[in-house]
Amino acid sequence: MATSAVARDVVFALRRKIAKIEGTLAERLAPPSDGQSSAGQPVAGLLVRRNGLASARDFFLPTGVERLDEILGGGLPKAALTEIHGTETRNAGAAAGLTLCLVSHMLRERSRPQDLVLWVGTAEIFREAGFPHAPGLDRLFGLAPGQLLFAEAPKPADALWIAEEAARIDELAAVIVELRGNPRELDLTATRRLHRRAQDAGRPVFLLRHSAVPEPTAAPVRLVAAPAPAVLRRTVLGPLAGSIGPPAFAVEIGKSRTALPGSFILEWNPDARTLEPRRDAVPENRVAVVPPSRGRTHPQAAAGAVLAFRNAAEPAAGDQPPGEQHPAHRRARRAG
């Protein structure tokens, strides 16, 4: 009996370590006892931790969308690394907007809503996507301009180092790391360090990526965000024609602890600071983004036949190969 009890304790300790590395919240496993399997079971729907019992809200941040929280297993983990992917660099506003929605909702649930948020990014992504607009932060997300701090790093490795060190600061409620593509420095080891720092500090770290190919990371949740067309603004008398409603996001679950897929169209309510599923249909008679040209009475003619031209890099028969060419920027221009 003593040998089996020791074996159960060893297996349970190993399961806790594996669960903590994978970000599956080892606190949900109850210690094994006589007559109980080593896998552990939730106790009366509560989560077990060292200092007693706690509800699921202590570990998860519900998004407010019932179906999304159900697929995510309770919501987003509060102390973990969470990935948010933008499909393209030009859609950086949608991915950043979804991240700010989650951060704003999280600050509203905290007892200290005036905590600071650090946004770390490389010079490349800030040059391509720009910085968030200060008046919009206050009006849409309830974030005062002084609450959001920015750190611009020359390289992805520097941005990751800043994020790891900043996760230890108690005055920060969350850390956002914004990168582009699949840099070599952002490997599985780097994401494990970020995830472990977030767990130890008890605060979330958001990895915001643009134009990136999904790859293995230590983040337990990955959301893919893209812009969605807005509906008409709702009024007491009904939809207001020609208006633009709340921001909308097309969100797809790329990775979760439950391994369940899901796609949603979510709208941000800036007054309640909550995400809501779309209820209204998008109007078909939307206004054109670009007005028609004044000097043209008829639409552009359809394209004609497509011709196959010779590749410029392949010389035709009888042509002499070009000589060595030097780029113009390697030598100064001649005067006169």
Image (spheres, rainbow, N blue to C red):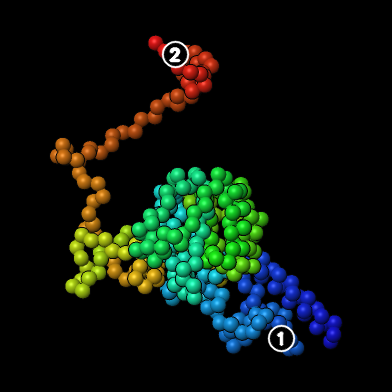
- The amino acid at mark 1 is Gln
In the picture, the quarter occupied by the N terminus is bottom right
Residue 101 in percent (x, y) is at 42, 65
Q: Residue furthest front?
A: 146
Q: Is residue 60 positioned above or below 161 on the image?
A: below
Q: Is residue 181 positioned above or below 323 on the image?
A: below
Does residue 255 appear in the picture of this structure?
A: no
Residue depicted at x 64% and y 64%: 196
Residue 260 in percent (x, y) is at 52, 69
Q: Earlier in the sequence, mark 2 or mark 1?
A: 1
Q: Is residue 182 positioned above or below 199 on the image?
A: above
Does the CB distance between marks 2 and 1 fall below 8 Å?
no
Q: Who is closer to the viewer here, 280 or 131?
A: 131
Question: Which numbered marker is on residue 36?
Answer: 1
Q: Indicate which label's residue lies in the foreground, 2 or 1.
A: 2
- The amino acid at mark 2 is Arg
In the picture, the quarter occupied by the C terminus is top left
Distance in Å between CA atoms under marks 2 and 1: 86 Å
Q: Judge from the rendering whether residue 103 lies leftward or rightward of residue 33; answer left or right.
A: left
Residue depicted at x 39% and y 70%: 273
Residue 165 in percent (x, y) is at 62, 58
On the image, which quarter does residue 188 sit in?
bottom right
Residue 301 in percent (x, y) is at 22, 37
Q: Is residue 58 positioned above or below 294 on the image?
A: below
Mark 1 residue element: loop
Residue depicted at x 16% and y 38%: 296
Does residue 5 appear in the picture of this structure?
A: yes
Q: Which residue is mark 2?
A: 334
Q: What crowding class fits label 1: few (fewer than 14 Cα within 10 Å), some (14-19), or many (20 or more)?
A: few
Residue depicted at x 71% and y 73%: 15
Mark 2 residue element: loop
Q: Residue furthest top?
A: 336
